[in-house]
Amino acid sequence: MSTFGIAPRSGFALAAPGSLAVSYLAVVVAGWLMDLGFPDRNWWPLTLLGVAGMMWAIKGLGFWKALGVGAVGGFTFYG
């Protein structure tokens, strides 16, 4: 029985990346995907995959590690 009549969450959820190296690799790929989604190539659905990859890569990390991983992803995207 749940509190206040709210049912527990059931659904699909991805597990957090196993290591920091996997997170760094994921944000590099995600940055490239987001770059490919820009208007010059017009492959905009890749931007959605890139954002999802960035969010997955920082899942479960602390603030400073997530900041570092996000910075690498941002530099990959803008660089």
Image (cartoon, rainbow, N blue to C red):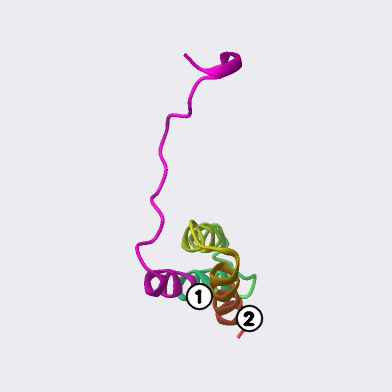
Question: What is the three-letter code of the residue carrying label 2?
Answer: Tyr
**Could you say which disc has been placed on residue 63 in the image?**
none
How crowded pointer 1 is (Cα within 10 Å; few <14, some 14-19, many 20+) is rated as some
Residue type at numbered disc 1:
Trp
Q: Quadrant of residue 22?
A: bottom left
Residue farthest along the bottom direction in this orientation: 79
Q: Residues within 10 Å of mark 2 (few under 14, many from 20)?
A: few
Q: Residue at x 50, y 75 (%)?
A: 32
**Stretch in magenta:** 1-27
Horizontal and vertical percent position of residue 58: 51, 62
Q: Is residue 26 magenta?
A: yes
Q: Which residue is mark 1?
A: 32
Image location of residue 71, percent across then percent down: 60, 77
Q: Secondary structure at mark 2?
A: helix
Q: Is residue 20 positioned above or below 46 on the image?
A: below
Residue visible at 49% across and 71% down in the picture: 27
Q: Which residue is disc 2 drawn over?
A: 78
Q: Is residue 12 magenta?
A: yes
On the image, the x and y values in percent for residue 4 come to 61, 15
Element assignment for label 1 = helix
Q: In front here: 43 or 60?
A: 60
Q: Nearer the viewer, residue 15 or 34?
A: 15
Precedes in sequence: disc 2 or disc 1: 1
Q: Is residue 47 left or right of residue 9?
A: right
